[in-house]
Each structure stands twice: as C-alpha cells, then as structure tokens.
Amino acid sequence: MKCSFCGYEFNETSATGCKSCPLQANCGQIKCPHCGFEMPQENLVWKWFRRRRRGAGAGRRHGQGKKVCTEGMTLSELEPGKEAIVSHIDTGNKSTLNKIMALGILPGVRVTMIQKFPTFVFQVGNTRVTADEQLVNTIMIQKT
C-alpha cells in the first residue's frame, strides 16, 4: 500500500491503526508507519485498478530513494499565476513533513503560485506561504 500523504510504500497488514484501540478489529483505518497519516483500507477492485495503471508507462524520478512519480511535477516547476492540486509530499524527513502539514498543505488541496523569485510565494486557500526551494521541491502537484 502507498500512503496518500507522503508516498511511502508499506505492507498493509503490518500498519493497521492504533493497537490499543477497542475498535481496531472493525475500524478499517490504516496508519502509515512513516508519517502517521491514517487512511481507509482500499478495496480489492481499487487495488487491482492501481496495479494495472501502474504498469502503463514509464515514470519520472523525483527526490531520493525509490519513489517514482508517473505524473505531475514539483511545485517549484509551476509558473506564477497558475493553479495546481497537491498530489503527494515527497520527503523522508519527518520534521519537514510536519512543517508542511502545519501549513495546511495536504494531498487534494489547490495551490496557486504567486512568485518564484527572490523566494517562492504560493497561496493555499486564503493563506499565502513563503518557502525556500528545498521545501517547495518536496511538494508534488498535478496541473488543473
């Protein structure tokens, strides 16, 4: 299974939700061991569809490790005035991930690039965020 927030791939059976929760058996939530994000379990049809889709086309590498992004680009590649949707966060650093989450930058959120120089300024909802290139390069987007 792949975390929809950080993109980390892990075994679904080893990452069930909170072990001490009395609803654990019927909860249906999976907790990412990398970032702690909780998401619902995928049904079998969706898993089959994702496997079939993943096999089509070659991917483009972003970041470090073995993560491959088959579509989209980094937020730093977005032109000023253009809008996109955050697809996932590509970082192995937990503190960076927490910083991005605290800013309200989550998968599915719309972002608009305001300026790229001298520093990156982009808008998330009604909030304008100023960030350095390293942080902006960890945010993966899809153009709308």
Image (cartoon, rainbow, N blue to C red):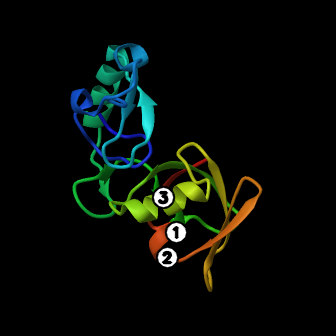
Q: CA distance from mark 2 to mark 1?
A: 7 Å
Residue at position x 37%, y 40% in the image: 3
Direction from residue 116 to residue 27 in the image, left or right: left
Nearer the viewer's eye, disc 2 or disc 1?
2
Q: Secondary structure at mark 3?
A: helix
Q: Position of residue 132 (x, y in %)?
A: 53, 77
- Residue 19 in view of the camera: yes
Q: Position of residue 108 (x, y in %)?
A: 57, 42
Q: Secondary structure at mark 2?
A: helix
- Residue 74 in view of the camera: no
Q: Which corner quadrant of the image does residue 81 belong to?
A: bottom right
What residue does disc 1 label? 76
Q: Amino acid at mark 3?
A: Asn
Q: Amino acid at mark 1?
A: Ser
Q: Amino acid at mark 2?
A: Glu
What residue does disc 2 label? 133
Q: Which corner quadrant of the image does residue 30 belong to?
A: top left
Of residue 103 and residue 24, the one placed in the foreground of this image is: 24
Residue at position x 62%, y 86% in the image: 118
Q: CA distance from mark 1 to mark 3?
A: 19 Å
Q: Earlier in the sequence, mark 2 or mark 3?
A: 3
Of residue 91 and residue 23, the one placed in the foreground of this image is: 23
Q: CA distance from mark 2 to mark 3?
A: 17 Å
The residue at the far right in this view is 126
What residue does disc 3 label? 98
